[in-house]
Amino acid sequence: MFFAGPIVNTAAILIGTFIGAVFHRIPERLKITVMQGMGIFVAVLGVSMALQAPGDTLYVVLSIVVGGVIGSLFDLEGKLEMFGSWLESKLGHSGGKLSQAFVFASLVYGVGSMAILGSIQSGVSGKNTILYLKSALDGFSSVIFTSTMGIGIGLSAFPILLYEGGLAAIAHYFGAHLRNVVIISDVTAVGGILIVGIGLNVLEIAKIRVGNLLPSMFVVALFRYIGLHLGSVLSFLHI
């Protein structure tokens, strides 16, 4: 079943969030230390991901610029914050932590080669090996994240289900167009840059509106797809 992987990943995040919420009585100094450590880890992870497409710097830079412009025009960050604030009011939370945790977890769990490759593997072959491994990692980390950032971590499970499930469904029906290593590496590289921004936000080094940069991931996939096919056409025409 090609949809099993996304479902298991979603369940793992929710279960981890529940455990983290139950065992949330952790000393403040320990929470701060863990968050700083996770912030450093996230930033380093982002850098390693961003370096996966060293030969495609132009595509990555253009996508960040174009995606940032699109995101700013639609004020995606603001809309995410409004959505988070609405959820906070409904759930009786305040202080902006729920929306921050929601955005943080959605990006950390959704951006990366494991999410992309795992979803494609599920859709194309029906195997869920990668997403099952990712589920174990996400479930463990969600316990730590929830104990320090709150239940907003669990809310990310639903966009992750749509994201991974959508990729798996597309791969199931149009797999041949997605099994391109170049496109995947470029999307991962752009996602890595966004992850670096998240890490800097967690460490409170800077306030980066990462939500406005989210369209960059779709833009780089489109640019790279066009570039690859345009190159094939030009080669065919001997231009």
Image (cartoon, rainbow, N blue to C red):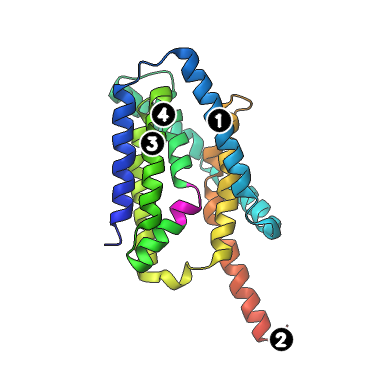
Location of mark 2 (residue) = 238
Location of mark 3 (residue) = 140
Q: Is residue 232 positioned above or below 170 on the image?
A: below
**What residue appears at the point 58 percent right and 46 percent down from the top-left corner?**
192
**Quick one: 152 or 129, which is closer to the camera?**
129
Q: Nearer the viewer, mark 2 or mark 4?
A: 4
Marks 3 and 2, Cα distance to the nearest angstrom? 53 Å
**Quick one: 48 or 176, which is closer to the camera?**
48
Residue 105 percent location from the top left of the image: 44, 36
Marks 2 and 4, Cα distance to the nearest angstrom? 56 Å
* Amino acid type for the residue under numbered disc 4: Ile
Marks 1 and 3, Cα distance to the nearest angstrom? 16 Å
Marks 3 and 4, Cα distance to the nearest angstrom? 7 Å
Q: Nearer the viewer, mark 3 or mark 2?
A: 3
Magenta stretch secondary structure, dominant:
helix
Q: Nearer the viewer, mark 1 or mark 2?
A: 1
Q: Residues within 10 Å of mark 1 (few under 14, many from 20)?
A: many
Marks 4 and 1, Cα distance to the nearest angstrom? 12 Å
Q: Are marks 1 and 2 in contact (CB under 8 Å)?
A: no
Label 3 or label 2, whichever comes before in sequence order: 3
- In the picture, residue 92 is in which quadrant? top left
Label 1 or label 3, whichever comes before in sequence order: 1
Q: Nearer the viewer, mark 4 or mark 1?
A: 4
Marks 1 and 2, Cα distance to the nearest angstrom? 49 Å
Q: Is residue 226 positioned above or below 116 on the image?
A: below
Location of mark 4 (residue) = 144
For this orientation, the residue located farthest to the right is: 239
113 part of magenta stretch: yes
Give the residues in magenta.
Answer: 111-116
**What residue appears at the point 43 percent right and 13 percent down from the top-left corner?**
27
Location of mark 1 (residue) = 39
